Amino acid sequence: MENENQSPVQNNHDAPVENKRQTENKKFLPISILLSAFVVAAAWIYTSGPKATEVVQPVDTVAEQDANSAKELEELEENVLPLDGVTIPIKWGNLGTQMIDAGVIDKEKFEEIYSKRGGFAEDQKKLLYGADNGEIKMTEANSGFLLNLFWAFGLANKNEILEKGPMVNYDGKEPASPAEAMEKAGRFASTGGWSLATSDAMNYYSKYPFVALTPEQQGVVERVSKNIYRPCCGNSTYFPDCNHGMAMLGLVELMAAQGMNEDEMYKIALRVNSYWFPDTYLTIERFFKRQRLSENPRKSHSSRTRRRRRLRSVSLIV
């Protein structure tokens, strides 16, 4: 069956008639084209209709973008590293003079180091030489000084973590003797790197009961130290193989000895680590702000794997 739309086949008798029609059609072709164009144009206008004027949103200039970035950074720094500092609610007492008397801090060496940096500030002198120090105020300016002070304390204060923990059994093997334990513990930056004592740092390692802990307080120190990780090496405070780890261990011992609860200890540790690792914690704060999240101090000191993953992810996102 033929297609109904197919044109009929012309025969010879119709040929002359077809030629005549073609001639007549040619006369009306221009008019048809004009009318067709008019109809198409009218139909297009009708179907599409008039378009609303598009509003072009203004784009911030480079100067405005720079100003916004500077403002954001200023807000982040004030939140993470407040200019007024943070108060560490522990009583330092005369621990500075005790460490000098014990030899873990050599007064002359310590003074020589800081004389090249402009000397001690008044608050630093008081912590080092004073006898009745109260709470400690940490600022960006004195964070390095406090790092060294807590480092010396963490190194010398007697504690089972130093004597029986990862510092001596990091390889899965218990030392056969106290001498072997000391030899193993002396291989790390937190021990071999402490050069501000009157003699070899290992002569002071876990030797002095500057702060004696009850069994309950020791348990708190162990729990908390296992959950505080530092971004420099990814190890926990329970394995204080670098200066930051040893300093944090000393601080945790002081907080536990003075009865601070664990939640508060995590908050203080987070603040202190922020001053010791400002770039890392500013990056984390920027990420949390953009995701409209809030940081949980306890979770901020989570497992090493989670910590590394988060830092890596945050750096990529920010």
Image (tube, rainbow, N blue to C red):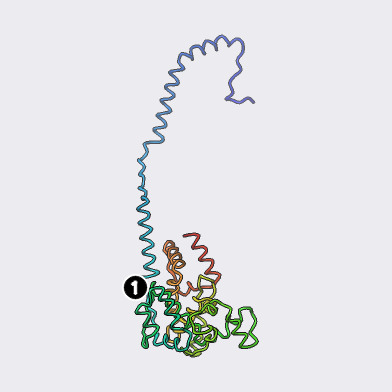
Instruction: Find residue 101 and report its horizontal and vertical position in percent.
Output: 45, 89
Q: Nearer the viewer, residue 81 or 186?
A: 186
Q: Which residue is mark 1?
A: 84
In which quarter of the view is residue 44 placed? top left
Which residue is located at x 54 percent, y 83 percent?
200
* Residue type, numbered disc 1: Asp
Which one is in front, 134 or 310? 134
Query: Left or right: where does residue 83 sit relative to residue 25?
Result: left
User: Is residue 153 shown above or below 33?
Assistant: below
Q: Quadrant of the N terminus?
A: top right
Using a 10 Å C-alpha cutoff, classify the residue at mark 1 as few (fewer than 14 neighbours), some (14 to 19) or many (20 or more): few
- Image check: 175 left or right of 230? right
Residue 156 point in image, percent of width and height? 50, 85
**Count of numbered circles on the image:** 1
Residue at 44% x, 84% y: name it: 254
Q: Where does the image place residue 58, in percent across and percent down from the top left?
A: 35, 47
Relative to 300, residue 163 above or below: below
Residue nearest the observer in this picture, 38 or 263? 263
Residue at 58% in and 78% down:
187
Q: Residue at coordinates 44% horizontally, 82% vertically from top-left?
A: 108
Q: Secondary structure at mark 1?
A: loop
Q: Position of residue 97 (x, y in %)?
A: 41, 87
